[in-house]
Image (spheres, helix red, strand yellow):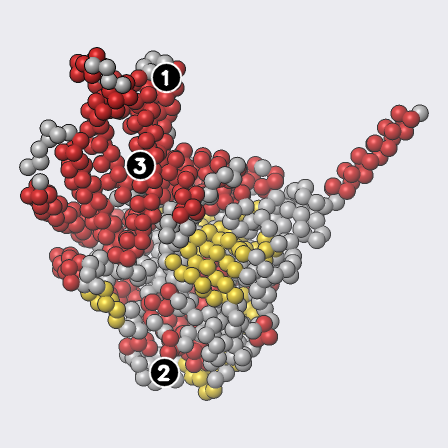
Amino acid sequence: MFAYIVRRLAAAVVLLFAVSVVTFAIFFLVPRFAGATPETLATRYVGRAATAETVKLTAERLGFYDPVPVQYGRWVKAIFVGTEYDYGAGVEQCPAPCLGYSFITRQAVWPDLLDRTTVTLSLAVGASVIWLLMGVSTGVLSALRRGSIFDRMAMGVSLAGVSMPIFFTGMVSLVLFSYTLGITAPGGHYTPFTQNPATWAYNLLLPWITLAFLFSAAYARLTRAGMLETMGEDYIRTAQAKGLPQRTVVVRHGLRSTLTPILTIFGLDVGLLLGGAVLTEKTFSLPGLGKYAVDAIVANDLPKVMGVVLFAAAFIVIANLIVDLLYAVVDPRVRLG
Amino acid sequence: MKSRTAIAVALATALALGAASACGGDTPNNNNTNNNNTTPAFNAAMGKVFNPSDKKGGTIKLANSGDWDSLDTGETYYGFAWNFSRLYARGLLMFRPAPGAAGNELAPDLAEGMGVPSDGGKTWTYKIRSGVKFEDGTVVTSKDVKHAVLRSTDKKTFPNGPAYFEQFLNLPAGYDGPYRSKGMNTDSAIETPDDNTIVFHLKQAFGGFDYLAQLAQTAPVPEAKDTGAKYREHFISTGPYMFEKVEVGKQYTLVRNPMWDQATDPIRKALPDRYEVSLNVNADDIDNRILSGDVHIDVAGTGVQPASLGRVLGDPNLKARADNPTLARLWYTSITTQVAPFDNIECRKAVLYAADRTGYQTAYGGPFSGGDIATTIMPPLIPGYQKFDLYPAGADNKGDVTKAKEALTKCGKPDGFEATMGYRAERPREKATAESLQQALARVGIKLTLKGFPQGDYFSQFCGNPPYLRANKIALCTNGWGADWNDGFGFLSQITDSRVIRETGGSSNISVRIPQVDQMIDQALAETDTAKREAIWAQIDKRVMEEAVILPGVYAKSLLVRGNGLTNVFVNEAFGMYDYLALGVA
């Protein structure tokens, strides 16, 4: 098991390196192939009507005159040993891991990412708990009551859930529940958990439910399909024939087998969400990683883009590793090695 | 008998109640005939104060769909940021917080009075009020203003702000800002003979220097506490409010500055106790939050989103909370002289005659959210504006096809020709404009090929890049410009002076290369008489239009919505949005 974990982590490092090279190339190299010069790149980061001298100074400050591999090497070096930042009136140390300074806000990227991660974590964890509970339980009940009114309604609602995009359900939910009925918080409100847990939960309730509605629909359908197949197996009939309580048959024998593919999907979904629930954060104006990424891309704020891409990739890799480890727990037949 | 009496009484009561409700209360009035201006009505905050009050207290909530470029007044270049900065920073002068034309007037803020020119307009002197303090209790002196202006010229540290002071001040050779040229004598540019006097020395005469003195860059910065690019994280206030919390990219809050003294500030009322600003909020959500009462102001001040437009205009109650100001902004199309056959003036005139102005206006969103049809470069809000129309487009404003064909004949292209037009691909209105022009010009045989370019590189690499234009034969480009301040220089200098055009790209002036206009601009700069100066700007407007290198589209308008519970709401013409300095909470 230990050797397996070490190998997977080593592979993760290689993967992250590859992701960083590709991302850097996309944002720093491709524009040059399209004819961009250091000056034309720098015009994005100056005020309107900036003089040629200002553009040149900005290109120098941002390192655009250096070859792209040198710029990449400087960025990688800062991750491991830190760097210095000249803010005009002085020089500031950016300790490792230093993912650089935003071209636009002049803030260090790493503290920003950590700060934003707590918001995205809050959103992802809360929503994932809700969708897992709702989706799996609905799927189990639907499977056990196949063909009933409950089954048909549940699957109908879940079809609506997967069909409607989050920016639609989110905006409609806000207008209905926040601005008309006034029972949930308006968009853009976020309170850290450590500041006030009750307000934290209240502010996130609508985004949680809206996001969970989207995901639980898929989980309900997946669970139902899995349970229908599993409950028809011979060993289930054997368990029932042995007189085991129905709840034990369903949960310990039926659901446990069904959980494997659900776990796979769950790991991927949570990993992707942790990388940034872009649409949800944008719709509800939550200052999380996803919104951070979109705003950075729109503003061409390259250090932020690099930082969030690396961060998100790391989350997905770690989430997948955890899922693989959990396989061994859920299914004793799985041997990691 | 009794029943008839009862009916009569009931009728009389109903009539009386109806008359009473028509006289005031909450009934929206779309004709805006309310005298005390407290009844919601369309355009109730245009030219007058809506809901006037001197009540202090409360919190004003603002939201921004984006972020400031910087809270540091030394390097911010957004109109809304300049409007808002007057809450926490005092420049030498400011635009008067008043409705109507008075909002375009300059008034002394940190200075006791307007600038006093001497040496033919090359020297400007201001006296600074006594007793003004920073939030930490330190007294503001002329040296703090000098430091503020000088640091703003350091474009390595502050690349975002306006560059007027570098352009005009007589800075010593080799000066690289106060951080890298510490100790260098800069009296050739700015002198501070005493703590309350500051003298600016310019390279050339500039009659409109007072407009530079109102820039946020003149707000004082104490050199001992200046942290360069990090100063934006804690800007030391001289205004009635100071920053309590700054979470970059998320939110700001301002609270009362205990060191602000009303006795030194005849302009500000400082009514609310607090301002809360949320950043990077979904733009459509901001509209919903204003309409529902959760937020008072969309701080960007550019108007409601397209999704809310129909809702606001279609609902009488919501429309009664809206204002529709015309802005000092022109949406237009540049016609370059560097791509044949547009090097021939008659071919350019053909475009101006053939253009469908109504189509242009419709492409931009119609008369409410698009703007008014433009026939000049300077919008009506710019002092000195003169109305003229050198290329009449017919009674229906759809273009004069006959005159266009005559012009084509004169330029040797009686059957028309092919040309390429660029526009910013992310802007649906510009795409619609290009398509409208394509259809309009096709009537006279000019076949336009349309090309969309990314807006981030539009001026640096594409439409604003002369070699690219020439190489790819792009003759027309959509464009737009808003004045840095409402005067001829603030509006025209960056789009009609050929000397701002760079071969490396990046200039907003894509097409105007008229040496005579450059001379007229210099003449206007040096003119210290306001009326004469304004007359020159009007002449420049006409001269550029004579060369047919700009096709004016619309004078931009926006649709703003007043937040519930706000007092003293009015559109300040200088900023084209609600005046943030005057607002209070009911």
Residue placed at 30% from the left, 76% from the top? B179
Q: How many C-alpha atoms fall within 10 Å of the one at disc 1: few (<14), some, or many (≥20)?
A: some
Q: Residue B244, labelled with which disc?
A: none
Q: Is residue B17 above or below residue A54?
A: above
Q: Is residue B331 above or below residue A249?
A: below
Q: Secondary structure at mark 3?
A: helix
Give the image location of residue A126, x and y in percent.
Answer: 34, 40
Give the image location of residue B59, x and y in percent.
Answer: 54, 56
Q: How many C-alpha atoms fall within 10 Å of the one at disc 3: few (<14), some, or many (≥20)?
A: many
Give the image location of residue B120, x and y in percent.
Answer: 48, 80
Q: Is residue B210 above or below residue A11?
A: below
Amino acid type, callout 3 = Ser
Pointer 3 chain: A
Q: Tell me the residue that label 1 is attached to.
A: A152
Give the image location of residue B360, x and y in percent.
Answer: 46, 43
Q: CA distance from mark 1 to mark 3?
A: 24 Å
Please say whether residue B371 is visible from this viewpoint: no
Q: Secondary structure at mark 2?
A: loop
Q: Residue A128, labelled with which disc?
A: 3
Q: Tell me the residue that label 2 is attached to.
A: B186
Q: Residue furthest bottom?
A: B193
| Labels 1 and 2 share a subunit | no
Dot 1 and dot 2 residues touching (CB under 8 Å) = no
Dividing the picture into quarters, in which one does residue B5 lie? top right
